Image (cartoon, grey):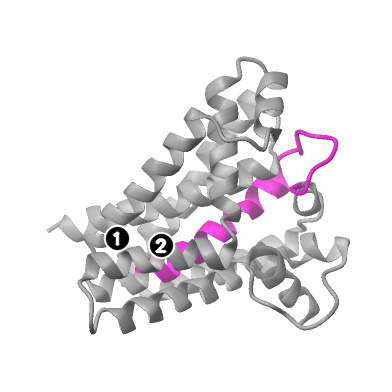
Amino acid sequence: MRLFLSAIQFLTRIPVPGSGAREGDIGRSSAFFPAVGLLIGAGGSLLYYSARLLLPSSTCVILVLVYSVLITNALHEDGLADSIDGFGGGWTREQTLRIMRDSRIGAFGALGLIFLVLGKYNLLSMLEWPLFWRWFLFANAASRWSSLPLCITMDYARDEGQGKLVARRVSLPALVIGTLTMCGAALVFPARTALAAIGVAFAVPLATGLYYRHRLGGITGDCLGATNQLTEVALYLSAVLLARMP
């Protein structure tokens, strides 16, 4: 229970009992990252369902996106912006890491966030309620799961950093538990759709991990946030494409 609460405290702004997570608990709590994603997805789905009784679906999507940012304190969006700034503006490994550490947002990062929000809004607005809640629930679980395989298979590219608290402490049992949770979330889909969704959830960390290895020789906390957001958007895109297939 302590580790589960640590995962909630690390990934969200939800107040939890206790004096705070211990440093070692953050990495060990990674097994529960997909479960926290399910909680976030369930909250967003409930908000959408309640709001759709009074508001058009497009407005409901905006409310859900605002909810997602507020409840997570924009943790992953910040990582995406920093990563895009670094990879877009840095030519060498050292330059890239230095830019990623800069707290100021650059043109690449700002544009990346704009395209991210527009992409989520556009894709989610195309989904009717039965599809919306299933994909929103799974995408939030799978996007939090995406950090686990990166952490367990890749080195940390910095000597220090917040992401190191997770990257160096993800264990094989945590990966197994997290993977089972993510795959269990796919039970909301029919079998063929579930396989496609799980395949996308595996493909994005693989593709981004290869890129991070090529550019940095490892990962940073910002890289984990970027993969989180790219996994989520890729799943929403998959939802739209599958819905249009005969």
Counting from the top left corner in percent of width and height, residue 122 is at 26, 53
Earlier residue among tags 1 and 2: 2
Q: Dot 1, crowdedness within 10 Å: few (<14), some or many (≥20)?
A: many
Q: Nearer the viewer, mark 1 or mark 2?
A: 2
**SS of the residue at dot 2?**
helix
Q: Which residue is mark 1?
A: 124
Image quadrant occupied by the N terminus: bottom right
Q: Which residues are magenta?
A: 135-163
Q: Which residue is mark 2?
A: 65
Between 211 and 106, the residue placed more toward the observer is: 106
Counting from the top left corner in percent of width and height, residue 42 is at 46, 78
Between 144 and 161, the residue placed more toward the observer is: 161
Counting from the top left corner in percent of width and height, residue 45 is at 39, 76
**Residues at circles 1 and 2 in contact by the CB criterion of under 8 Å:** yes
On the image, which quarter does residue 148 sit in? bottom right
Residue sitting at 67 percent across and 72 percent down? 8
Q: Is residue 62 left or right of residue 43?
A: left
